[in-house]
Image: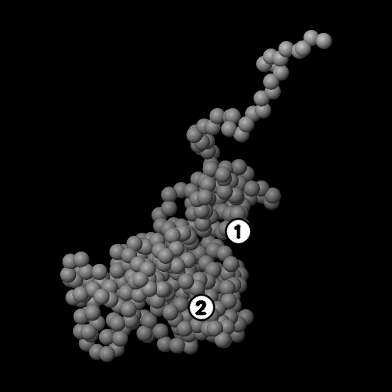
Amino acid sequence: MAQRRYDERDVRVRPTKGSRPRTKQRPEHADAVSALVTGVDRGRYTVLVDAGGPDEHRTVAMKARELGRNRVVPGDRVDLVGDSSGEEGTLARIVRITERRTVLRRTADDTDPVERIIVANADQLVIVTALADPEPRTRMIDRCVAAAYDARMDVLLALTKSDLADPAELVAMYSPIGVKVVVTQTSGARDERVIHGLDDLRAALDGRMSVLVGHSGVGKSTLVNALVPDALRATGIVNDVTGRGRHTSTSAVALRVPSTDEPTWVIDTPGVRSFGLAHVDPQHLLGAFADLAAVAQECPRGCTHADDAPDCLLDEWVAGAPDEETSAARGARLESFRRLLASRLGDVDR
């Protein structure tokens, strides 16, 4: 029997994964529609299409593959393709994130290189702080002020539970450095609460997108529910032993505030226990302390303003206070700044 001769027709070549040439060209998505991201939940994004327009409606979207690891957060303005009608069972795709005006970030601690974007395009950071139950933590406030300064956002300090403690000390500490302060008080039973000072808070929020940040239990979600009656944000209580609140809000969500002259949004965020500033340049920290920055302009050239800085005028500023009360307040401010600076540089534990 003659031996069979083989030729190229007998060779079967299977296509490999890389056999198809790839292109760097991406679709332009010229028919994409704009939307505002209002919520994020396990890879699904609630967005408001044509926000503020005549055809405004909500829909659900997913992130397109071409966005890679780019994080989409509440406050983002995005472009959608696919079915953005909002009808049940439909799912659009987010293909672009438009340029962000502001970005509020935080890290797990002051040395963690991983930044976490909290919200985008917010005009104002509202630091919600209880005057008691739990006790106010001025170092946390200072950290939030520093993060807002770095993000080029305005700062509003919302003091809650003024029925339990006098707000005068904190007002005197932050008002002179350009931080707006509003004071609220709660009265009535838990299911029939009345928030006093809400009109002042609403006026401070009018026409802006504001993000609320604070520890659990400070009354943040209570304020949101008062501002947006149909928000139904869960509220919790403070542990009598630890003095800390229980996490009730589990995800950030943007909500429109009714009864305001201009379109107004608040973004409620989960309670935080820490606010790392690893993303903030240490040289920019002083700018968040306007009172200290004004004095430091006269410091010797190259002054680090740290504890061991020779001839730092910040120490003279504290020592030259007109009375003991002012000296104590200035000393607390300087200590807070230097602790932030040392923590950011890795000299001490936060």
Q: Nearer the viewer, residue 22 or 295?
A: 22
Q: Earlier in the sequence, mark 2 or mark 1?
A: 1
Q: Are marks 2 and 1 in contact (CB under 8 Å)?
A: no
Residue 319 shown left or right of residue 166 in the figure: left
| Image position, residue 89 (x, y; %) | 69, 49
Question: Mark 1 is on which residue type?
Answer: Asp
Q: Residue at the spot x=40%, y=54% of the render?
A: 101
Q: Secondary structure at mark 1?
A: strand
Query: Which label is found at residue 41?
Result: 1
Q: Residue at the spot x=54%, y=83% of the render?
A: 242
| Image position, residue 49 (x, y; %) | 55, 50
Q: Nearer the viewer, residue 232 or 314?
A: 314
Q: Is residue 219 above or below residue 206?
A: below
Which residue is the site of mark 2?
A: 218
Q: Count the marks: how many?
A: 2
Query: Which label is found at residue 285?
Result: none
In the orientation shown, which residue stands out farthest toward the bottom? 324
| Image position, residue 160 (x, y; %) | 47, 80
Name the image quarter holding residue 124: bottom left
How crowded pointer 1 is (Cα within 10 Å; few <14, some 14-19, many 20+) is rated as few
Looking at the figure, which quarter contains the C terminus? bottom left
Looking at the figure, which quarter contains the N terminus? top right
How crowded pointer 2 is (Cα within 10 Å; few <14, some 14-19, many 20+) is rated as many
In the orientation shown, which residue stands out farthest toward the top? 2
Q: Nearer the viewer, residue 258 or 117?
A: 117
| Image position, residue 122 (x, y; %) | 44, 60
Q: Residue at the spot x=17%, y=70% of the render?
A: 300
Residue 149 in view: yes
Residue 146 in view: no
Q: Residue at the spot x=32%, y=74% of the render?
A: 338
